Image (tube, coloured by chain):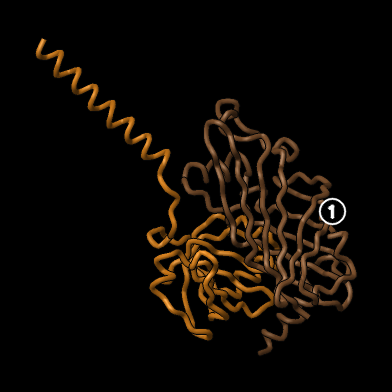
Amino acid sequence: MFKNKKLLISIVVVGIVVVGLVVAYLFRPEKECVCNVKSQSEIASSELISRYETDENLANNDFLGKVITVNGIVNSAKKDEKGRTVVELDAESIGLVSCTLCAKESNANELSVGSAVKIKGECVGYTIDVVLVKCCLE
Amino acid sequence: MIVMTIRLIFLASLFLLSLNGFSTKYITKTGYAYFKSHTDAIDIDGSNRNVAAIIDPATGEIVVIVLIKAFDLPLATAKEHFNETYMESDKFPKATFKGKLTDLAGKTLAVDGEYPVTAEGTLTIHGQSREIKQKATMKVKNGEVSGSCKFQVNINDYGIVVPADVKNRVAQVVDVVVEFSVKPQE
């Protein structure tokens, strides 16, 4: 009787833990930053734009949805409506590389136009610019 | 300086688009898009502040580009399903609208006021294109030009398939809002 009771309690406890883990997994918040994610490649802003301007599909194969590190010169740095800093990197071409810093990076960093920076972020594609989100300064 | 000059030239002839002539184009790269799927089981919504839009008031032509992976969804699981199962954003990274604001052609947007317009053209989502016609509003206030449009998208029209086991959790008709402030580029 005592053994069965112990077993029952164990099953209930394990059940609660499993359900808790599943709920925690399903309802985990989206990551705001990629600071702790390993970069899959490093590239100059000019090279990144050039790759997209040459062949967008091919560039998407290489960069879309991936965390990459981009080197470049700050063209502008402005806050968006959510208070996140959007850094535009010169790319020696027509388009720019637009990097939206995540909230904690936006609070911590003031960037000056003309300074050289290295920014890690998730590439989400190409409009007029190549767009990186969830970015962190390296 | 040279790069800046090249960029200004580019912006004037923007984008491989059929926007013609030497008239002033209005451009943004930080427009806003929002969607909401409402069901009795759950509401799913997402927002995106990386929307690009180009308008030529002289002809009324407009192009809007929305990067699908740039949508923020509050829950990681919802974002995964949105990108991988429904929108297939690796295959179809953009949604676009290319068409005309039919009541805008010929206006300069130099005078403050509210301009009700009709957006008419091709909406492409998930690789599927459909002709649409939708009421929208352009506003000019202190020289700043903004636009907004609310509409609904039937996901069936764009080949978006929802697995049977979650059909009650994803709306067949999704509410969409697009808003942007555009700046003139000569």
Q: Is residue A96 above or below residue B85?
A: below
Position of B131 compared to A102: left or right?
Answer: right
In the image, taking residue A118 as reference, residue A54 lies left or right, namely: right
**Chain at numbered mark 1:** B
Who's brown, chain-wise?
A: B
Residue A93 or A88: which is nearer the viewer? Answer: A88
Colour of chain A in the image:
orange
Residue B99: x, y in percent?
A: 83, 57
The residue at the point 77 percent across, 65 percent down is B114
Q: Secondary structure at mark 1?
A: strand
Say whether residue A53 is left or right of residue B40: right
Residue B132 or residue A122, whichever sits in front: B132
Q: Residue furthest bottom?
A: B1
Q: Quadrant of the N terminus of chain B?
A: bottom right
Few, some or many residues within 10 Å of mark 1 (<14, 14–19, 20+): some
Q: Which residue is drawn at the image coordinates 65% and 61% (left, top)? A: B51
Residue B145: percent from left, percent from top: 72, 71
Instruction: Choose top left, top right, bottom left or bottom right for residue B58.
Output: bottom right
The C terminus of chain B, quarter of image: bottom right
